[in-house]
Amino acid sequence: MADVQSPWPRVTLVLGGARSGKSSYAERLVDGTLLGDAPRPAMLIATADPADSARHGDAEMAERIAAHRARRGAHWATIEEPIDLATTLRHVAADARPILVDCLTLWLSNLLLRDRDVDAAIDALAVALSEIQVDVALVANEVGLGIVPDNALARRFRDDAGRLNMRLARQAARVVLMVAGVPVPVKGALPA
């Protein structure tokens, strides 16, 4: 639970482009090592589906998942949930460990590819975030800074990602934009 000693507000949104340092920054924020503290027990809700990657022969995604796992230490517990993020968040929050959700952009992609109601899922996530009482960091890609996609599904994805990020940025006490590995405060102060 967030308290006076917590170096960060209860909900932090970490945005950035591909390979901008979002995940490693959020991991260090959640486990306490960002400020040089000893690692504390932390929980990761991973939205990637390793079984799905294996089924589709996506070796590159499997390597990314393995690299993320190797970077985190034994103080991390991981739950993989590609779809029902709100329910999982509520369940995991009962453990009272700080939580990292990585990543919302992949979660959105999972919803779209399974033809789920994106607006309802975002609403459910926002409600869950308002109900739980533990520190949470959310990682998402900022995809709206590039070219206009050339097909309807890609444009829908870009638009839905923008709406998701705006909704959660309004709700978060802190928003950080990662640029070339450097955290840039967008909303709220960076931990000192």
Image: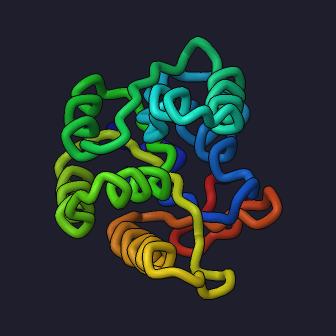
Q: Quadrant of residue 34?
A: top right
Residue furthest out toward the right: 180
Give the farthest residue toward the front.
56
Q: Residue at x 49, y 60 (%)?
A: 13
Residue 66 visible in the current orientation: yes
Residue drawn at the location 69% of the way across and 21% of the way down? 70
Which image quarter holds the N terminus? Answer: top left
Q: Residue at x 48, y 58 (%)?
A: 105
- Residue 99, x across and y down, in percent: 42, 36
**Residue in the picture at 54% in, 46% down:** 7
The image quadrant that residue 122 belongs to is bottom left
Q: Is residue 169 visible?
A: no
Residue 145, horizontal then vertical, whole percent: 65, 82
> Please, which residue is most extreme toward the top here?
74
Q: State whether residue 92 is above or below residue 157.
A: above
Q: Is residue 80 placed above or below 151 in the rendered structure?
A: above
Q: Nearer the viewer, residue 54 or 62?
A: 54
**Residue at the bottom extreme, as displayed:** 148
Residue 115 in the figure: left or right of residue 159:
left
Q: Does 106 sit left or right of 84 as displayed? A: right
- Residue 98: image x %, image y %? 42, 34
Instruction: Say whether residue 165 is left or right of residue 26.
Output: left
